[in-house]
Amino acid sequence: MRILISILRKEFIQIFRNKVMLPFIFIVPIIQMVVLVFAANLEMKEIRFYTVDLDLSETSRKLRYEFSASPFFRDQGTGFSLDEGEEMLLRDKADLVLVFDEGFEEKLRKENHSSIQLLINAINSAKAGLVNAYSEAIIRDFNQDVRLEWLGLPAFEAIENIDVSYSYWYNPELNYKIYMLPAILVILVTIIGMFLTAMNLVREKEMGTAEQINVTPIRKFHFIIGKLLPFWVIALFELAFGLTIGKIFFGLPILGNLALLFGFASIYLMAVLGIGLLLSTFSETQQQVMFLAFFFMLTFVLMSGIFTPVESMPVWAQKVNIVNPFAYFMRVIRMILLKGSGFHDIRHEFVSMFIYAVSILSLSVWRYRKIH
Amino acid sequence: MPEIAVNNLFKSYGAINALRDISFQVDKAEIFGIIGPDGAGKTSLFRILVSLLLPDKGSIQLAGLDVVKDYSQVRKIVGYMPGRFSLYQDLSVEENLSFFATVFGSSIETNYDLIKDIYVQIEPFKKRLAGRLSGGMKQKLALCCALIHRPEVLVLDEPTTGVDAVSRVEFWDLLHKIKKEGITIIVSTPYMDEAARCDRVALMQNGEFLGISLPGDIHKAFTKILYELTPEQGAYKLLKTMRSEAWCENAWLFGQSVHLTINGNTSENQFLSYAKGQNIEFRKITAGIEDTFMELMKTS
C-alpha cells in the first residue's frame, strides 16, 4: 500500500508538472467540442440550385418558385440550355440543377404525368442524398397542389393518398450537435485512456527508469496499478468536465441516469487502459506506441458508428465491432443521454463490456509480465 | 562466507556469447573492480547480479541469497546504479530521493548519515529537476538513490563514464567512505587508472575474465620485456613501422609514445642494434595495468 501510494504520488506530480498534459486535459475538450460540433454538421441550409427551363411554362416557373421559397435552397438563376446547367455544376456554382424539358407542361396536361430531371453534385455522397431528399419533398408537395388546382375536387383524390407526418424521437429537431456531442466525449475519454497511458508506460522504458524501478521492491502489479489508476481517474474527470460544458454551452440533453453512465464509463475505461497497456508491451519508444495507438484509434472510431449507423455497415464490419470497445460506448452514451435508457436497456452492452475489460486486462498484464 | 559468489556463469544473446564461464567471489566490504572495454560483457554481468536478467547457466549468490530464486529478497539488499542515468528527469532531486526511499520503506532521514557526504554537495539544488543537473551532479544523485535504503551490496555500472577527472577522484573517495560502512561494492569502469583504487580487480574481455588480482599485482602478469619508444614526430607512423617488422610481437600506442614487446625468436641485442641504426629513442620500462591488459587481450 505504501509503495502504491508513493507511485501514485509520483505519477500525479509528473502528470501535473507536464506542460503539455495539463492544458491538454482542460482545453482540448472545449476546442474539440466547439470545432467539431459546428464543423461536423450535416444540416444544409444553402443548397444552391440552378434551373434549366426549356419549357418556359407556368408550371415549370411555379415549381421553380417552390424551390426558391424553401429555406434550404438558394436560387442561382435560370438558363435555357443543358450546357449552361452542366457548366454551373462543373464550376461548382450549383449543387443541384433542375431540368425542365420542352413540353413539360403540355405532357402533364395531356398524359397526366410528366418528368423533370435533377442533376446533383455527388462528390459528397451524404450531402447529395440530402439534396435529393429535400428536392423530392418539394416536388411531392407540388404534385399535390397541381392535382388540387387542376382537378378541382381534392376529396376523392386525397383519399387515395396516405398522408405521412413525422415525429423524430430522441432528437425532435434532428439537431446534429446533439448527436455528435456524446461521440466527441467518447473520443476524448479514449484518447486519455489509451494514448496517454500507453505513452506514459513506454516513456519509463525509453528513459531507462523502468530498469531502476525493477531493482526495487516494487512489484509488477504495484507498477501497473500505479500507472493505470491516475489515467482512469483523469479520464472520468474529463467525462464529467465534458458533460458539464456540453450541458451549459451546447444544451446537451441528459435524460438518463448519470451514475449509470459513469458506471459504464468506468468499465469501458478499464478495457481501454488494458489496450493501452497491451500496446505498450509491443513498443520500445513513444513514437512507436503513438503510431500503434493512432492506428487502432482511427479504425475503432470509424467503425464505431460515429458518423454512420453501425446497422448500415456490412455484416463483417458489424462482426468486427464486437471487439471494438468504441462501438459499445458510442451506443450506450447516446442511449443514456439522449434516450434516457436505464440499466435494463443496456444490460447486454454492460455485460459484454465487463467481459471485454476483464479479458483485455488479463491479457495485457500477462503479456507485460512475460516481457519484463 | 563471501558476500558475492558467482559460479560458472554463462549468458548468450543468440549467437553472441556475452558471458563465458565467469566465476568469482567478493568479500564483505570489498571494492571489486571490473575493467574492460565496451562490449566486454560488464553490463550483462551486472544486470544478472541485480536480477534484471536471467543467466543461461551458473549460480549467483548475494549475501547468501540465490539471485534467480530469491530475486525479491535480493532486490531489497541491492543498490544498483545503471550505466545510463535512469532517474526521473522530471522530478526534482529531493522528489527522486524520497520516492526511492519510500519505495524501500525508508526515508531520507533514516539513512541520512550514509549519504550525507554526497548529498550535501547536491543539496543546494534539491528543488531542481534531475534532468537539469550537470553530469557529475547526476552521478551523485544516482549514487544517493542507490544508497538510500542502506543496501548490503552496491552495484555500479561505469559510474564515472563521462565525468570529469576531478569528479572522478572525488567519486572514488566517496566509494571508500561507503566501503567503511560495511557495504560491498562491485564497480565496472573502462578507465585503467581507476583499477588502482579497487581492492581487487578483474580484467574482462569478450565475456571472459582474463584474471583477477590485487591492483598492485596486475603488472606481474606481464612477464616480457617492455620498451617505450619516443618518436620525434608522429607516434602513429612509428607504430605502423614497428608493427610491420618481423621481430615485433606486440605494439600499441601509449599517449605520445609507443610501447612494444619483441617476440621470442629475436634476442634483445638484435633489437638494440636495430633501434640504434634507425636512431629511435627508447628505454626499458615496467609494465602498468594498461600494458598488462593490452598484452592479456592479445594472448587470450
Image (cartoon, coloured by chain):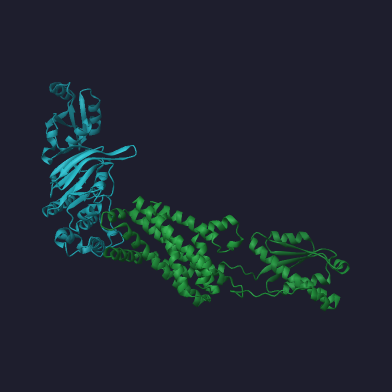
Chain colours: A green, B cyan
Q: Quadrant of residue B251?
A: top left
Task: Report whether A51 appears left or right of B230.
Answer: right
Residue A242, given in percent of the width and then of the height, sits at 47, 71
Residue A105 picture location, percent across and down: 84, 68
Q: Is residue A74 above or below residue B240?
A: below
> In the displayed structure, would residue A242 be above or below residue B273?
below
Residue A26 shows up from this direction: no
In the rendered image, residue B95, in percent from the top left (x then y), is placed at 26, 64
In this orientation, does residue B257 appear? yes
Rendering quarter of residue B294: top left
Q: Residue at x 12, y 41 (%)?
A: B214
Counting labels gives 0
Q: Nearer the viewer, residue A260 or B294?
A: A260
Report the residue that reaches farthest toward the right. Answer: A110
In the figure, residue B297 lies in which quadrant?
top left
- In depth, the one of A82 and B217 nearer the eye is B217
Residue A42 drawn at (x, y percent): 61, 67
Q: Is residue A210 above or below residue A141?
A: above
Vertical arrangement, residue A164 with respect to residue B38, above or below: below
Q: Quadrant of the N terminus of chain A?
A: bottom left
- Residue at x-position 23% and y-position 51%: B70
User: Relative to residue A296, is residue B98 drawn left or right?
Assistant: left
